[in-house]
Amino acid sequence: MARNRSGLYKVMLTFAISTIGCKLNQYETDQITGRLIDSGLRKVDYGQPCDICIINTCSVTKNADRKCAQLVKKTSLKKPKPIIAVIGCGASNPDTKIGDLNPDLLIKNEQKDQASEMILNKLGIGISKGRYYSSKTRAFIKIQDGCNQFCTYCIVAHLRGVPKSRFEAEIISEVKSAIKMGYKELVLTGANISLYKDQKINLSRLIDKIISLEGDFRIRLSSLEIKGLTKELLSLAASPKFCKHFHLPLQSGSDTVLKRMNRDYTSSDFLSAAFAAREFLGEDVALTSDVIVGFAGETEEDFTQSQVIVKKAGLSKLHVFKYSPRKGTKAYDFNNQIKELIKRKRAQKLIALARVLRDNFIKQQLGKNHRILGEKFTDGKIEGLTDNYLKVRFDGNKDLINQFIEVELTKEDYGLYIR
Ligand code: SF4
C-alpha cells in the first residue's frame, strides 16, 4: 500500500517502463524504477494494465524515433488509458514532435534527474531514493553524461548537453552498494566515458579505485572513444576484475569521411589503439565496434576502406548502422546524401563481413578456459557472458545464476555462440 501526500493509504499504484536505446538510458530507467518502487509503486511488465506507463526514448536514428512514437500511440489506445510519461532524448528533440502525441508528461534530458519526482507528483506521492538494477547480475553505473565532441552526424551531443561527470565519491559509493547487493558485473556507462573527470580523477584513476575494492566482481566498460584507451587504462585492464572487452567506435575506415564526421582520429590511430590493446592484453581481448555506412559523400572507395580497417583491426563484433540524417546536426545539411538502396547494400556487405570476423574470433577461442557469469537458466541450460563478450550456453542448474563459472569453450559441448 502506498501513502499519499495526505497520509492516507491507498491501493498500490502500478507502473510499467519501456526503454529504447543505449546503456545510459537503461541506467536511467533503473534509477527511476528504484525510486518508484521505493516510493510504494509496483512494477509490471510493459503491456500489462497499469496506472502509469513510462517510455524512456531514444532519438539516435529516425528508426528509433519511429519506434518511440509507435509505442506512445499504442499505449494511448489502452483501455483504461494509463498516464503516459515520455522521457529522454526523443522528448528533448523537437524534431521528433513526440509532444504532439499529447503524453501526460514530457520530460526532457535536462529534467531527467527529477523524472521520478515529476512522475510521483503526477500521482500525488512523495519520493524515496531507492536503487534498482533491471538485471539480476549486471548493474549499469552511470559515471558521466553529455559530450562536447559534436560529431557532425550525432544528435546525442545536442540532446544530452555539455559533459558532466559524477563525483568520484558518489560513484564509489554506488559501486560499493551494488557489490553489497550481490551484483557481479558492473558496467560503467555514459554518453562519452572517455571524458570522465572529477578534479584529478580521470577514467583510469576511477577504474583503479573501483578494481581495488574488495569483492568478487568484474567491471566492463560501455563504448569507449579511442582517446580513452590510454596506456594507464590498458595496464589496469590486465586485472582479473576488468573484462577483456573494449567497444571502440570506429564509425568509418576512411580518413576523409572521419574528418567530415568530425571524429578526432584517423584510421591508423584506430588501428594503433586496437594493436595496443592486443599487445597489452593478448589475442583473447574482444574488440567490438560501430560503423556507419552511407554517411553523406561516402564513396565506394571510402566504404572499401571501412572494410579494410575492420578486417585489419580483427574486430570480434560489429554494429552496422545506415547513416540516418538528424535535423539539428551539421551533417543533415551536407550535400551528396547517399541513396537508401546503396546504404542498404553496403550495410548487408559489412554485416556479412562482421559474421566472418565473429566466427574467426570464436574459432580462436575454442579450447580456452573462460570465467562466465551465469545470467539465465532455460531448458536445463545456463547462459552467460565470458569476460571477452562471448555468449555461452551449457548444461547447468539455477544455482549457477549470478555465479562465476570456469568453463572450457567447446563448440559441441557448450553450444557456444557470440552475443
Ligand atoms: S563522441 Fe559520441 S556522443 Fe559525442 S558527439 Fe561523437 S558520437 Fe556523439
Image: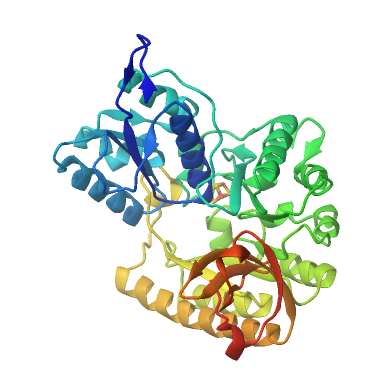
Compared across the picture, whether 6 is left or right of 261 comes to left
Percent x, y of residue 226 = 69, 57
Looking at the image, which residue is at 15% across and 37% down? 80
Q: Can you say which quadrant of the picture contains the N terminus? A: top left
Is residue 275 in view?
Answer: yes
Is residue 254 in view?
Answer: no
Compared across the picture, whether 152 is left or right of 143 comes to left
Looking at the image, which residue is at 66% across and 61% down? 403
Q: Image height check: is 329 above or below 342?
A: above
Closer to the camera in the image, 246 or 117? 117
Closer to the camera in the image, 317 or 75? 75
Compared across the picture, whether 339 is left or right of 410 comes to left
Which residue is farthest bottom?
Answer: 412
Closer to the camera in the image, 327 or 233? 233
Closer to the camera in the image, 184 or 270? 184
Percent x, y of residue 43 = 38, 40
